Amino acid sequence: MLSYFCEFIPALFSSILYLADRGPGYRSSSSGSGVKMLFSSSGFVLRSTEICRVYRICKKFSSLHGEPPELFRKDASYLSWGSRESSISIQGLTQGVDNVCKILEGGAWGPAMETALSTFNDNPQQELVISVLRRLKDVEVAINYFRWTERKTDQGHCPEAYNCLLMIMARSKKFDNLEEILKEMSLAGFGPSNKTCIDFVVSCVQSHKLKEAFLFIQMLRKFKFRPAFSAYTTLIGAFSSVNEPDLMLNLLRQMQELGYEVHVHLFTTVIRVFSREGRVDDALSLLDEMKSNSFDADIVLYNVCIDCFGKLGKVDMAWKFFHEMKAHGLVPDDVTYTSMIGVLCKANRLDEAVELFEQMELNRQVPCAYAYSTMIMGYGSAGKFEEAYKLLDRQKERGSIPNVIAYNCLLTCLGKKGNIEEALRLFEEMKKDAAPSLSTYNIVIDMLCRVGKVDAAFEMRNAMEEAGLFPNVTTVNIMIDRLSKAHKLDEACSIFEEMDRKVCTPNAVTFCSLIDGLGRHGRVNDAYRLHEKMLDSGHVPDAIVYTSLIRNFFDAGRPEDGHKIHKEMIRRGCSPDLTFLNTYMDCVFKSGETEKGRALFEEIKAKGFIPDVRSYSILIHGLVKAGFARETYKLYYAMKEQGCILDTRAYNTVIDGFCKSGKVNKAYQLLEEMKAKGHSPTVVTYGSVIDGLAKIDRLDEAYMLFEEAKSIGIELNVIVYSSLIDGFGKVGRIDEAYLIMEEMMQKGLQPNVYTWNCLLDALVKSEEINEALVCFQSMKDLKCAPNTYTYSIIINGLCRVRKFNKAFVFLQEMQKQGLVANTITYTTMITGLARAGNILEAYGLFEKFKAKGGVLDSACYNSVIEGLSNGNRALDAYTLFEEARRKGFSIHSKTCVVLLDSLHRAECLEQAAIVGAVLRETAKSQHASRSCFDCFFTSAIHTTTEHLVGYVWTLDGNTVVSFNQIPINLKILASVVDGASDLDTLTSFFLHEGD
């Protein structure tokens, strides 16, 4: 008998393994029935009450002959559950389940509910627990009931109960207790069944919880469970649809570690996604791994490689795969040829595509419609519509009626080329061969909206409905997007409002298109209200929507609201992408928030993004505009070290930064590099370098670059011409400045106020005030309104030649024009009057400007103090001196000396002492390496001992200064002190006086 039982044990193990794999559905009857059938078929009559004894016998037997299989141990607890003698009938079980579910659904879990459950059944059987768990949907209720039954029976649950609990978590999308449950199962000696494992992953995939499904697989591995093969393949397939190649490869490696046979189709799936993401090296590495493991690549893999590598622009590599598959004895099919033809057409290698197409057609009885459509698309994209029509006719001659795809391809190409009339003709013609599809109508509506033919687009939409096709959300999105871009927002909003929500519900793209259109046209409040409506409709705004909102709020001059949008985005849990952060940083810099812009650049790196070339371009441009052009050098090399490939915009930004930071030679090098790398310089590029050269007086080089830009056909703008006018004007080359102005006007470009100001400033500095007045009148004749700086330049010029009355006339004219005279204008007038000795007028204007609340500067105070001092109004001058000091203005050394002289003459010795002290302090601060004011002169003269024999100088109350017995006027000395920036300047002065 024992020997017979020994032969029976392996069959018993196999039966239990079979039962474990059948899952919850099979065990809904009596899980012991399969075992009883096995015993009875072997000559045993086994009652349900004896199942537990079988387990004990098996366990005892295993102690003699080694451990039973793992799954047998895992299911043992189920066999040991209670007595089967009191098994519940199916009808009674159903009634019991209904009663328990009613109690559980009756309210929140608590003592009252536990009492109700105990009253109904104080000792719940396992069949009841499992059936109740299968009915429940709320994971919290399920766990509470699960724990309550555990406490009531004082026994652990069977594997099936745990499996049911896992499935409730998957269906309810709540995974907080997942690790806890799996840990309990591990300690109990059993794990999820294969069916549960697969169903859990499938449920997560269907609810788009892919990361949670991945986490579930990792937890199974953590607790030493073996995830089912199908769970892996299902999840790999799901990750392929959302382009997560790294996670797919991770799962593939786990399968290999577990000993699963990884077939070529799995490799193909992973390779496809790596190729689609542009990660060519990773894809090739997997291909090499396949070859090293002796996997035979099939035609599907070759087709995937041809298509994916071709789309990445690796045409030669696609050709390699095409020839390699033929070398391995695989015959290219329709998919192979169509893919390769499409790759060649997109790479503008049309002749090779035609040759391959003819090769495919050779000895072929039935033409491939898809290959014809691809070839027609190739001809259309190249603008060869005659060849496309011929191929269409050839397809008809061969007995294959062109399908709607072929016509759609041609219509798309015609639309891109702007051949609307031809497209409409073809649309009517296609009706003879194929009924236009919804996509066909969408293509035609799109091209009509693009060219602004809104009425025709509406007519086409009506024709679609008459043909029995109703606009879908794509149709609506096309019309809303195109109308928004065509500045027809009212029509776009009307289409949105008229959408039949029962037939066509707006999606996230619909909302995004209209929000962006409203925002770009300044209707930011309407855009935000639509954003709120989007939230109310259950759609979650993504980073694209928030990017549009932030950009449009900043463009509307409402940066505070833009910052609020950013905070709202973070609060709602929407993760910013790199495009959002770049846009936000650009807006912040443009609004003058330089430090915030720097912080956003650092945030890009902190969030795990790698700053791209646009990130660096925005940062450099923002810093240059804020006056930090010197940082361009460091950021440029950081960008190069990171491997960023500069585009035209990046080159322009860096070149501008180098020019503004004085590194014009480096900017010149970058201009040459830009041309060498195939990037065509734009007007911005040339404008930056020309301006940089003009500012450092390298005008001949600037002009040569100016001529070069014209010779290659670049349309130069007013800014470039103005830079040259300003450069030539500043060095006194007025005639050349005039010639450039004349050339600009001959080309139809009107000088702006900046251009005129550059020319006027040059004329004033050359003391050509009459010419400047003529120029000023010409400016007004050409309808270019002068601004505050224009009037300041003219007033300054008139004051230079002592035409103060005329200067006052211009000041009054300026005020009549509604222009507010600024500090520069008043300083110019006051300084001119003071220097000309018109002290009363200067002082009166000074007080008038103060009374108006004008902001006076240091130059204004210094000029008036000097004027009053020279006009023998020492105490008035001293009063202003004290006022200037209180306000923190810098008092020039020259001003102090002139005031000191005036106070001595007026015998105001106390005030003179104070001014003298300030003078000494000023000298110390300007020349910290010298102990006092006189040491400075001593050093200056000692530097020229080879020319000067001796010196004696004094500075006393009589204001007598002598040098080598040569009297030196104090005012001249003060002027030198004030203007000298180094010892050489002072030395040259003394030598000149000595001569």
Image (tube, grey):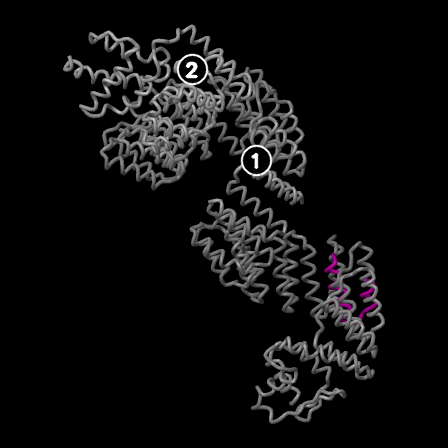
Is 953 in front, or is 13?
13
Q: Vertical placement of 340 versus 135: above or below?
A: below
Report which residue position mark 2 lands on. Answer: 123
Q: Position of residue 737 (x, y in %)?
A: 64, 63
Q: Position of residue 683 (x, y in %)?
A: 56, 52
Name the quarter where the C terminus is drawn.
Answer: bottom right
Magenta-tinted stretch:
787-809
Kindly report which numbered mark, 2 or 1, lies closer to the viewer in this rendering. Answer: 2
Q: Quadrant of residue 373?
A: top left
Q: Secondary structure at mark 1?
A: loop
Q: Is residue 857 visible?
A: yes
Estimate the spatial distance between the alpha carbons at disc 2 and disc 1, rounded to whole Å. Answer: 47 Å
Q: Vertical placement of 420 versus 764: above or below?
A: above
Tell whether 705 sits left or right of 82. right
Q: Residues within 10 Å of mark 1 (few under 14, many from 20)?
A: few
Report which residue position mark 1 lands on. Answer: 572
Let me know if residue 180 is in the magenta part.
no
Q: Secondary structure at mark 2?
A: loop
